[in-house]
Image: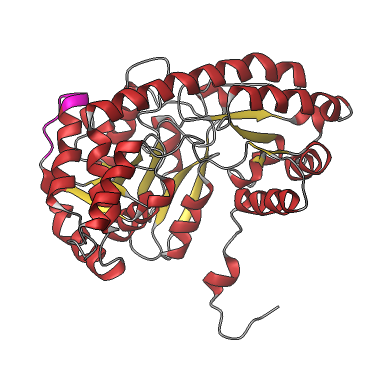
């Protein structure tokens, strides 16, 4: 039904289903139900105390005014310094753009790298909002199916086969949401060659790049120096509500992206930027690494428990805090399954349709962002309801 004043874009925008699940969960909690939240991709850990203390000092000192649109020089230098410490890469701080969360970074990357009508290749399954970002800017999101046989990650041959006239960019993620899988370095290099050879833009989501369990963390910049990198303080640093992210852009992108940021966002949050400097302190890093080990233990518990619930795993998650499980043993409607589980036993899960409009009906995403004892309780609650499924 037509609504006066609304654009076609506004009418066509799909819901972010995980937020709908969260709203339903909170409604149940409001009437006294105990809900185990395994739906939202938000760490249960608090923001590290050094970061909170730095924010308190900044507010007390009145450090609340606008900063440059691309972020303070101090924070950009700190981010660049972290690339040197972690990966041995010397990144000019001028290439770093601090943003109002990773969402703003993705929008800036698309705004700088694509025009209305351009096609953007996206892995399917993939982060739900990416295709909405492309649509909102007038682009055409093109899903590239990524089967479990390739770890739910694209290959260079699949990218090449999906490329059509009008294709302008490819957006990838490693570790990926919802699967937690990594893109092999050799495959990333091959994909970059395909994209570069066609004059395209490679946008790399490394939001979960420090949450890797079975190997040292890495960055696409080590092998693809002209990639546009998107990252965030939300996940590894447990700063979701602080709304702070960053980009690393090629040199010829610096001024255009700054102009876009000036007009679209004015500036990133000032207090959050000042606080984030404490995220790179040694004491904070020690705490954060302990949390990575805790997440790995949670993952390992669920990897052992889920097959007994009829939830099959086709690709081992190596990072982030998600498991993408095949739920076909319990029917071919993941939305109905998740709704029933929530209503019957109070475990909130995300239907795979958030990440793949097609194959997502056969999968659910589990976010292990709760303590081990709550995960054990979730498994115990799921046994009877999944036992009656199918």
Q: Report if residue 266 lies within the magenta region.
A: no
Q: Which residue lies at the image location 52% right of the left edge and 70% below the top edge?
A: 9
Quarter of the figure that contains the C terminus? top right
Q: Is residue 346 left or right of residue 366?
A: right
Please identify the residue farthest to the front as the structure is shown: 60
Which of the two residues, 355 or 71, is positioned nearer the viewer here?
71
Which of the two residues, 40 or 308, is positioned nearer the viewer here?
40
Q: Quadrant of residue 117?
A: bottom left
Please identify the residue farthest to the bottom as the structure is shown: 4
> Can residue 214 be seen in the rendering of this structure?
yes
Please identify the residue farthest to the right as the structure is shown: 388
- Residue 377 sits above or below residue 342 on the image: above
Q: Quadrant of residue 384?
A: top right
Question: In the rendering, at what x and y percent does residue 130 appear?
Answer: 46, 50
Question: In the rendering, at what x and y percent does residue 308 appear?
Answer: 75, 16
Question: In the rendering, at what x and y percent does residue 254 appear?
Answer: 15, 54
Q: Is residue 76 left or right of residue 317?
A: left
The magenta segment is: 85-91
Quarter of the figure that contains the N terminus? bottom right
> Can residue 250 be seen in the rendering of this structure?
no
Q: Is residue 341 left or right of residue 46?
A: right
Which of the two residues, 312 or 322, is positioned nearer the viewer here?
322
Q: Please, which colouring scheme is shown? A: secondary structure
- Residue 71 sits above or below residue 261 on the image: above
Q: Quadrant of residue 299?
A: top right
Q: Which residue lies at the image location 31% right of the left edge and 23% below the top edge?
A: 286
Q: Is residue 230 left or right of residue 348?
A: left
- All told, the count of numbered labels is 0
Q: Which residue lies at the image location 29% right of the left edge and 49% below the top edge?
A: 55
Question: In the rendering, at what x and y percent does residue 243 appear?
Answer: 38, 52
Q: Which residue lies at the image location 51% right of the left edge and 36% below the top edge?
A: 44
């Amino acid at each position: 039904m037509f609504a006066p004043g609304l654009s076609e874009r506004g009418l066509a925008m799909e819901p972010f289903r995980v937020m709908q699940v969260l709203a339903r969960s909170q409604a149940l909690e409001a009437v006294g139900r105990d809900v185990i939240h395994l739906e939202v991709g938000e760490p249960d850990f608090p923001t590290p105390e050094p970061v909170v203390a730095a924010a308190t000092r900044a507010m007390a000192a009145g450090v609340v005014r606008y900063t440059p649109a691309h972020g303070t020089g101090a924070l950009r230098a700190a981010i660049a310094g972290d690339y040197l410490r972690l990966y041995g890469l010397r990144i000019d701080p001028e290439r770093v753009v601090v943003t109002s969360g990773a969402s703003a970074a993705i929008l800036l990357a698309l705004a700088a790298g694509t025009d209305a009508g351009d096609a953007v290749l996206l892995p399917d399954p993939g982060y739900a909002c990416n295709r909405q970002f492309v649509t909102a800017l007038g682009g055409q999101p093109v899903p590239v199916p990524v089967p479990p046989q390739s770890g739910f990650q694209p290959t260079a041959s699949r990218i090449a086969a999906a490329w059509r006239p009008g294709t302008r960019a490819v957006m990838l993620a490693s570790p990926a949401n919802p699967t937690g899988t990594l893109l092999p370095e050799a495959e990333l290099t091959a994909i970059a060659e395909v994209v570069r050879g066609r004059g395209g833009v490679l946008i790399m989501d490394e939001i979960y790049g420090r949450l890797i369990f079975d190997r040292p963390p890495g960055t696409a910049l080590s092998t693809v120096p002209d990639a546009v990198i998107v990252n965030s303080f939300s996940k590894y640093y447990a700063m979701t509500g602080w709304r702070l992210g960053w980009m690393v852009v090629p040199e010829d992108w610096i001024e255009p992206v700054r102009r876009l940021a000036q007009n679209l966002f004015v500036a990133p949050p000032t207090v959050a930027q000042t606080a984030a400097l404490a995220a790179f302190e040694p004491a904070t890093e020690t705490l954060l690494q302990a949390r990575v080990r805790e997440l790995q233990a949670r993952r390992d518990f669920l990897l052992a428990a889920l097959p007994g619930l009829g939830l099959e795993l086709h690709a081992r998650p190596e990072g982030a805090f998600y498991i993408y499980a095949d739920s076909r043993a319990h029917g071919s409607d993941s939305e109905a399954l998740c709704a029933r589980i929530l209503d019957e036993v109070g475990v909130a899960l995300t239907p795979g349709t958030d990440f793949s409009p097609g194959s997502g009906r056969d999968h659910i995403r589990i976010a292990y962002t709760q303590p081990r004892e709550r995960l054990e309780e979730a498994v115990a609650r799921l046994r009877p309801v999944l036992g009656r499924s199918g």
